[in-house]
């Protein structure tokens, strides 16, 4: 292949990728929180964080995920170039004893593109309505 052909193919390839309109394998990390809407006071719940980020590799990956309850950080997971998450979509979970209504917040971050923002889930206390009855 001569130099002219090589340049022509190179320019055509770059143009084709550029006209695609969206970056290939590049996005921000996001979290979806899974938890019950209501629970009895004193009940332990499982909180699942479903993390999504396309194209995790040693250069471009989710580098951290946290979960907070009522603005207090409960757990943080950190990832690096040689310790990335197990896949593009992964789940982390924690157990938490609910005594009063809570607000769960979580966020994940891509080391190159950032985060889609903080996700929030409210868990309310289910009252029995049996006050004063014997």
Image: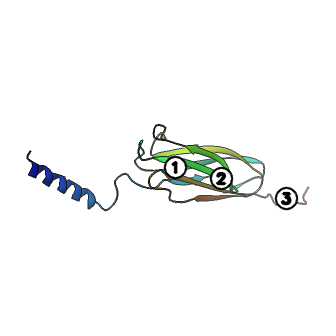
Relative to 22, 125 lies left or right: right
**Helix, strand or loop under label 2:** strand
Task: Work out whether mark 2 precedes mark 1 in sequence or the reverse, and give the earlier one.
Answer: 1
For image coordinates 70% across by 46% down, the residue present is 96
Could you say whether the residue bearing mark 3 is in a helix, strand or loop?
loop
Q: In this view, does 104 lie above or below 81?
A: below
Query: Gap between marks 3 and 2, in whole Å?
Result: 32 Å
Neighbor class of circle 3 (other Cα within 10 Å; few <14, some 14-19, many 20+) is few
Q: Nearer the viewer, mark 1 or mark 3?
A: 1
The residue located at (42%, 55%) in the rendering is: 27
Q: Foreground residue, 94 or 14?
A: 14
Left or right relative to 81: residue 49: right
Asked if marks 2 and 1 touch (Cβ < 8 Å), the reply is: no
The residue that mark 1 highlights is 51
Q: Position of residue 59 (x, y in %)?
A: 41, 45
x and y percentages locating residue 129 in the rendered image: 82, 61
The residue to which callout 3 is attached is: 130
Mark 2 highlights which residue? Answer: 68
Verify CB contact (< 8 Å) between mark 1 and mark 3.
no
Question: How far apart are labels 2 and 1 at the CA level?
Answer: 15 Å
Q: Which residue is nearer to you in this view: 75 or 123?
A: 75
Q: How far apart are marks 1 and 3 (CA)?
A: 40 Å
């Amino acid at each position: 292949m001569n130099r002219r052909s090589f340049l022509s193919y190179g320019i055509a390839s770059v143009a084709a990728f550029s006209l695609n309109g969206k970056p290939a394998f590049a996005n921000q990390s996001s979290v979806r929180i899974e938890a019950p809407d209501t629970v009895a006071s004193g009940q332990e719940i499982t909180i699942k964080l479903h993390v999504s980020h396309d194209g995790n590799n040693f250069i471009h990956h989710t580098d951290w995920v946290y979960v907070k309850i009522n603005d207090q950080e409960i757990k943080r997971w950190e990832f690096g170039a040689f310790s990335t998450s197990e896949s593009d979509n992964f789940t982390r979970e924690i157990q938490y004893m609910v005594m009063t209504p809570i607000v769960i917040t979580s966020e994940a971050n891509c080391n190159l593109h950032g985060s889609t923002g903080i996700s929030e889930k409210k868990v309310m206390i289910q009252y029995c309505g049996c006050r004063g009855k014997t």
